[in-house]
Image: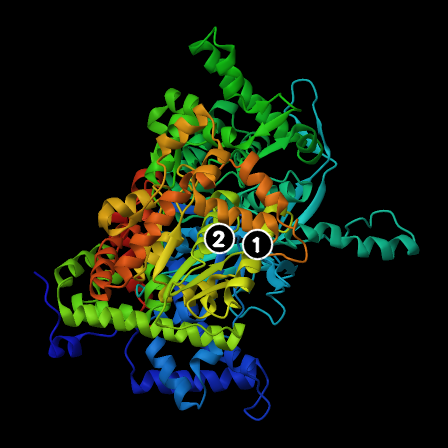
Amino acid sequence: MATPLTDQEKRKQISIRGIVGVENVAELKQGFNRHLHFTLVKDRNVATPRDYYFALAHTVRDHLVGRWIRTQQFYYEADPKRVYYLSLEFYMGRALQNTMINLGLQNACDEAIYQLGLDMEDLEEMEEDAGLGNGGLGRLAACFLDSMATLGLAAYGYGIRYEYGIFNQKIKDGWQFEEADDWLRYGNPWEKARPEFMLPVHFYGRVEEEDGKEPKWVNSQVVLAMPYDTPIPGYMNNTVNTMRLWSARAPNDFNLRDFNVGDYIQAVLDRNLAENISRVLYPNDNFFEGKELRLKQEYFVVAATLQDVIRCFKTSKRNCSGPLSFDSFPDKVAIQLNDTHPAMAIPELMRIFVDIEKLDWDTAWNITKQTFAYTNHTVLPEALERWPVELMERLLPRHLQIIYRINQIHLDHIASLFPDDMDRIRRMSLIEEEGGKRVNMAHLCIVGSHKVNGVAEIHSDIIKRDVFRDFSELEPEKFQNKTNGITPRRWLLLCNPGLADLIAEAIGEDYVKDLNHLQKLNDLVDYDTFIRDVAKVKQDNKLKFAQYLEKVYNVDINPASMFDVHVKRIHEYKRQLLNCLHVITMYNPEFSASLLQSSAAPGYHMAKMIIKLITSVADVVNNDPVIGRKLKVIYLENYRVSLAEKVIPATDLSEQISTAGTEASGTGNMKFMLNGALTIGTMDGANVEMAEEAGEENLFIFGMRVEDVAEMDKEGYDALQYYESLPELKQAVDQIKSGYFSPKQPEMFSDIINMLFHHDRFKVFADYESYVKCQERVSALYKDQREWTRVVIKNIAASGKFSSDRSIKEYATEIWGVEPTDLKIPPPSEPREALEETARTLRKN
């Protein structure tokens, strides 16, 4: 049985934030002053807080560079199989504090900045979020990069360096307005441009086919892909991997082949057309928009990346010293497709192998299939990518030919197995005929990959049983589950230092690299001192967040109230409306602060109406002279990674209330669990596994299960029946309908009311009664703070499974065919021989 560490044992521990040595601090101060002087060309008389941030960022980056170069040298010597993670989104957030933690520099930097008379938190707040993602999919990619580096995998993230990331959300009079996220305005100290590796990407043109010769793609337009590299440090292991993001550049002769003076000016201005490819992130990851620019982005990233991958393969130590053979390509290269967005990589690799490297079709196809694996992230039909054939034919004519040939061979195989089943052949085709010819990108990914995975057990079951049933029946061994995870470095050490240190004092610090150690906390669930300490950390976090709300949002909330938080992108399936109806129902004495936050995709009308409804309800509730002191509803604008790092540690209750069977996994639920919030949720996504790990009695589970939803779909969902039989629901709906929350425009929310009654696919009313009753259980437990905190400890102890380290270990061993290693790369201070010796050790293993 674990007992809390003694004071002597605590003193023996090296802090999880690094040692503060006099030399370290002096060196950091010297580096800071050097960068302020030589890099920023300022002195302390004229330097701004932003200058101080940049000086510190460059100083910390100096400690990365030697390790970064060392890591690449090590990979060359050891020649391991390399993993390439392709994603259109990497929602990285801020880099400074994460880098200090992973290098073990945080305490020394804190001390150095203190001695320089500056405030570390103020400097950290100067950093722009790298908001190159919409939500879960992009943030998962960021967590995975952290874990791949921490596990010593030779892994690379590839994506697009969007000039403008996810929009900045402003709320004016309750309505959402979008502002461009000019995150590169002041420069980015963490990236390194690599113009020497600039690569051409082709679009448009036509395919020439001469008798007896391979087809040739000619008369294409060229756009250049310029790489920018960002270091990805592993935790305390000297590994620094690379995220390479591509930026579009027009070639110097763009539109200039035939010009007179007047045309020259226009041709130079037209360079923007080429460079628009990397201008802006599409602001929706759960709705497919068949826009030409988006398809250009998707092909741009894969075309540049695959050229880079093949260059790296050809220049590896093994291929430099012997004849080149692509037979070993799948033994040295694993490519993971993060959803269907990079699916064009499959026909592009085939084009390279067949048209350029002159491999025969069967050999090329065999290598391609063994190289790719595909992660599916959604079951919502509107989110699945289906590109019009006409658009693809114009933009990528050779690739459409290749897709047709892949499809023909695939359908011939299906027809040989099921000769009379035309319906199955139609369902499994890569080309959909109904409503205009379209390429089904998920089908392309499945056919072109050797493994396909969902991101939670329930989600993987749904894609095997329903969405891709025909494919899983054909190749059941191809389909796997890989439950998502989160990195404990950012989502505990960085964002909740009080809790991280408390856990380290109680059970040691091994949990940082193996989150399963948190199970030891179960032994402390009845220790009064530990219960009090956990409750105090939560209260301190709430107080700090309340002060932040007052300062930034001018909102005054009571830190002793329950912080009930619903953090999701606004979407009907995430059911912010269910929460909103409960808030209206609670319009009676209740000590609670309800925080709702997220953003709506700019073109998504219903989502914007939901935001307006929430803010309108908040206005009425918060300004009520009696209720307003007991119940507060706050909509926090511009939710992003750096705001999540503040709100998650302060949360008491986490809302995970999607309709069962619609949320693939969720990762916010895991972040809240790890940081000591209890979950109210449906049996959906990763909630199911959270309930398995912690015990269903330690979560607040309500509502229909997947099979109940399926049954209701069969029988038909009748919203009116619930409205008429539940007086509290009727009252809440009538208040919205009558204009109680919008007296100047009583009809304002008629679209929402109409949707709820007539085409609510996500059945809000059906789960209303169960949700309200479950919230009553929440309130009852919260009144017993000791018991509440005991349940919190049980949840933290059960969150070990949800580390992205565990996810990546499973991807590595079961999909990519690589082994994680705890070998520590020798630091730059050690001789090259030490590096070669470590590389030999890795090769032997």
Q: Residue at x 44, y 47 (%)?
A: 728
Asked if the residues shown at circle 2 and circle 1 are in contact, with their CB atoms under 8 angstroms apart, the answer is yes
The circle on residue 613 is 1
Quarter of the image for residue 108 reads bottom left
Viewport quadrant of the N terminus: bottom left
Looking at the image, is 416 positioned above or below residue 835? above
Q: Residue furthest left?
A: 1
**Residue 101 appears at what percent x and percent y?**
35, 70
Give the side of residue 741 with respect to residue 376, left or right.
right
The amino acid type, in three-letter code, at marker 2 is Cys
At numbered mark 1, what does the secondary structure look like: helix, strand or loop? Answer: helix
**Residue 44 appears at what percent x and percent y?**
54, 91
Looking at the image, is 390 positioned above or below residue 482? above
Q: Residue furthest bottom?
A: 45
The residue indicated by pointer 2 is 580
**Residue 12 appears at what percent x and percent y?**
15, 77
Foreground: 470 or 159? 470
Looking at the image, is 617 positioned above or below residue 328? below
Coloration of the structure image: rainbow
At numbered mark 2, what does the secondary structure look like: helix, strand or loop? Answer: helix
